[in-house]
């Protein structure tokens, strides 16, 4: 695979049922530049009031912090598990991880990252289908990748990771309202589904870590903490903790029949 660096990205804000063009990011002379779109300045929406106040003109990022990005955009990047998958995937295709510039990494995030910001054009992935996902199989593949034993599934796990943060293996998926069907998250939201994040145990975790985290979530709710819906996804072999994404909207409920095992 020939490496072609990303030099220009358009940034969008997807919030409250509306999509707004925020501005453009550019990479020039080893420095990240940003300029707001004029209508976004007029909107009065502040995404970074200290470092990127709403005004015309080009902003230049500090190259010594946040991977050379502005902090608000750096926050879209994966860390831990997601960065491991990205690094191993590009190196599998003959691209050294250090070749990637900050905009390359954001382009891999595309519209599928955590939070309300999205980036175009997107790099690296074909459109996913809506075939049911098997959690036990994905958990085994994640463990193999962590142990450095399997590179064949890197791209699939990266697609499912959705640029989520944290060190533990996890996937972002769509889950039917009745919790009986789980499909790929990197596609248009299907009728009756909602966006969820499901975590897998690492080799250092207790076998019942999913059940333990779920129990903690119930305790937090009983204590009055406002938090998204959580669920313990049970298969024939294990239990996995999941939480509904608060940064994505759901579709109206429908009936699903496929198993999650």
Image (cartoon, grey):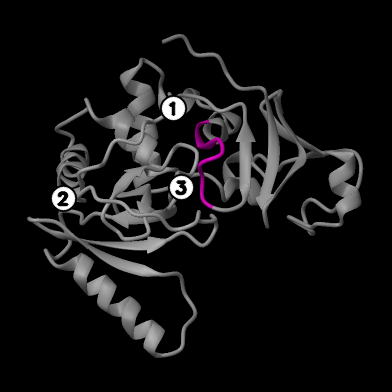
Q: Is residue 19 left or right of residue 221?
A: right
Quick check: can you spot residue 191?
yes
Q: Position of residue 137 (x, y in %)?
A: 15, 42
Dominant secondary-structure state across the stretch colored magenta: loop
Eye-nearest disc, 3 or 2: 3
Part of the protein shown in magenta: 108-114
Give the residue at mark 1. 127
Which numbered disc flags the more N-terminal residue, 1 or 3? Answer: 1
x then y, percent, for residue 169: 29, 50
Residue 236 location, x and y as percent? 8, 56
Per the image, the residue denoted by label 2 is 261
Is 67 left, or right, of 241 in this rendering? right
Magenta run includes residue 113? yes
Q: What secondary structure is marked by label 2?
A: loop
Q: Which residue is mark 3?
A: 191
Which mark sits nearer the N-terminus, 3 or 2?
A: 3
Q: Does 88 sit above or below residue 244?
A: above
């Amino acid at each position: 695979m020939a490496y072609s660096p990303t030099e220009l990205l358009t940034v969008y804000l997807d919030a409250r049922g509306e999509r707004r063009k925020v501005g453009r990011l550019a990479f020039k002379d080893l420095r990240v530049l940003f300029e707001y779109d004029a209508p976004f300045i007029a909107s009065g929406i502040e995404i970074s009031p200290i470092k990127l106040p709403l005004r015309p003109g080009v902003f230049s990022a500090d190259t010594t912090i946040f991977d050379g990005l502005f902090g608000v955009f750096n926050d879209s990047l994966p860390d831990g598990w997601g960065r491991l998958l990205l690094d191993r995937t590009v190196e599998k295709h003959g691209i050294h991880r250090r070749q990637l510039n900050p905009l390359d990494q954001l382009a891999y995030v595309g519209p599928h990252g955590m939070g309300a910001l999205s980036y175009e054009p997107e790099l690296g992935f074909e459109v996913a289908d809506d075939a049911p996902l098997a959690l036990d199989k994905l958990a085994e593949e994640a463990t193999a990748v962590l142990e450095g034993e399997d590179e064949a599934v890197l791209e699939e796990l990266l697609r499912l990771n959705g640029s989520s943060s944290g060190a533990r293996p996890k996937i972002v998926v769509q889950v039917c309202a009745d919790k009986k069907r789980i499909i790929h998250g990197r596609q248009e939201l299907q009728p009756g589904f909602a966006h969820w994040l499901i975590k897998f145990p690492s080799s250092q975790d207790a076998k019942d870590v999913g059940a333990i985290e779920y129990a903690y979530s119930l305790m937090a709710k009983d204590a009055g903490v406002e938090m998204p819906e959580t669920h313990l996804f049970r298969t024939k072999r294990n239990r996995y903790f999941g939480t509904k994404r608060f940064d994505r909207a759901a579709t109206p409920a429908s009936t699903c029949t496929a198993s999650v095992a």
